[in-house]
Amino acid sequence: MIDYIIRPMSFGDIKQLSDLDKRCFAVPWSEQSFAEEAENRLAYYLVAEAEQTIIAYIGCWRVIDEGHITNIAVAPEYRRQGIATELLTRIIHAARSQSLVLLTLEVRKSNSAARLLYESFGFKPIGERRDYYHSPTENAVIMTLMLGEE
Ligand SMILES: CC(C)(COP(=O)(O)OP(=O)(O)OC[C@H]1O[C@@H](n2cnc3c(N)ncnc32)[C@H](O)[C@@H]1OP(=O)(O)O)[C@@H](O)C(=O)NCCC(=O)NCCS
């Protein structure tokens, strides 16, 4: 079991988040993108930190009464230890406590690890966005969790 804490993202995390994204995605977000998220009052980001190093994060936008999960990533060496599960649990709890109706997200069709993670929380595929991703081009599956349902 690794020892880590989960806390809200701060401006001081931007460089580390950008470095982490480069290790997790073919098309990572820039430092500028993370800076914009840190300033976005509708955005809620949590980071997982172990020994002063950010090892994972999750982000969500509040759009009226819906939550849109923007991204989730765990550093490769920390995967399959329940960290994404813990981050998602916290986001779902926050969404419920704000009386949001649903949580929704897009995921690459081929990303079976992420899809299994979301399915384990009850997210259901409700449609696809054609060629939503590039490098490589791929459809997104839209997955949604209705929060009224326990
Ligand atoms: C997807 C990701 C966030 C999962 O993070 P994680 O901390 O390893 O996930 P967890 O340990 O909480 O796993 C929870 C469940 O998800 C599923 N899962 C996660 N990784 C999996 C894998 N590689 N293969 C199959 N199932 C997987 C399993 O059901 C797992 O439960 P189990 O370990 O009891 O079998 C991580 O692999 C990652 O950062 N990937 C790259 C970035 C990415 O694709 N993000 C999603 C963007 S939509």
Image (cartoon, rainbow, N blue to C red):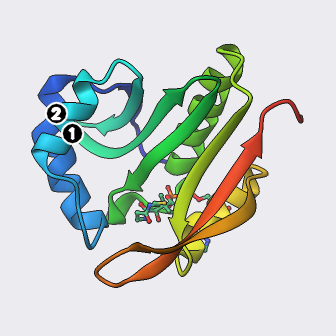
Q: Which mark is residue 35?
A: 2
Q: 10 Å neighbourhood of mark 2: few (<14), some, or many (≥20)?
A: some
Tell me if 61 is positioned left or right of 126 in this view.
left
* Residue that protrudes farthest toward the right in the picture: 150
User: What residue lies at 50% left-to-right and 47% top-to-bottom?
Assistant: 83
Q: Which mark is residue 34?
A: 1
The amino acid at mark 1 is Phe
Tell me if 51 is positioned left or right of 1 in this view.
left
Query: In the figure, 10 relative to 61: above or below?
Result: above
C-alpha gap between disc 2 and disc 1:
4 Å
User: What residue lies at 78% left-to-right and 33% top-to-bottom?
Assistant: 147
User: What residue lies at 11% left-to-right and 42% top-to-bottom?
Assistant: 32
Q: Choose between 125 and 114: the one closer to the eye.
A: 125
Q: Position of residue 42 (x, y in %)?
A: 41, 22
Q: Quadrant of ligand 1?
A: bottom right
Tell me if 14 is positioned left or right of 103 in this view.
left
Q: Position of residue 101 (x, y in %)?
A: 74, 28
User: What residue lies at 21% left-to-right and 39% top-to-bottom?
Assistant: 34
Q: Quadrant of residue 110?
A: bottom right
Query: In the figure, 69 relative to 120: above or below?
Result: above
Tell me if 136 is positioned left or right of 61 in this view.
left
The amino acid at mark 2 is Ala
Query: In the figure, 96 relative to 37: above or below?
Result: above
Q: Choose between 25 and 50: the one closer to the eye.
A: 25
Q: Position of residue 114 (x, y in %)?
A: 56, 65
Q: Quadrant of residue 3?
A: top left
Quadrant in which the C terminus is drawn: top right
* Residue that protrudes farthest toward the bottom in the picture: 136
How many numbered discs, if any?
2
**Distance from mark 2 CB to nearest ligand 1 atom below 8 Å:** no
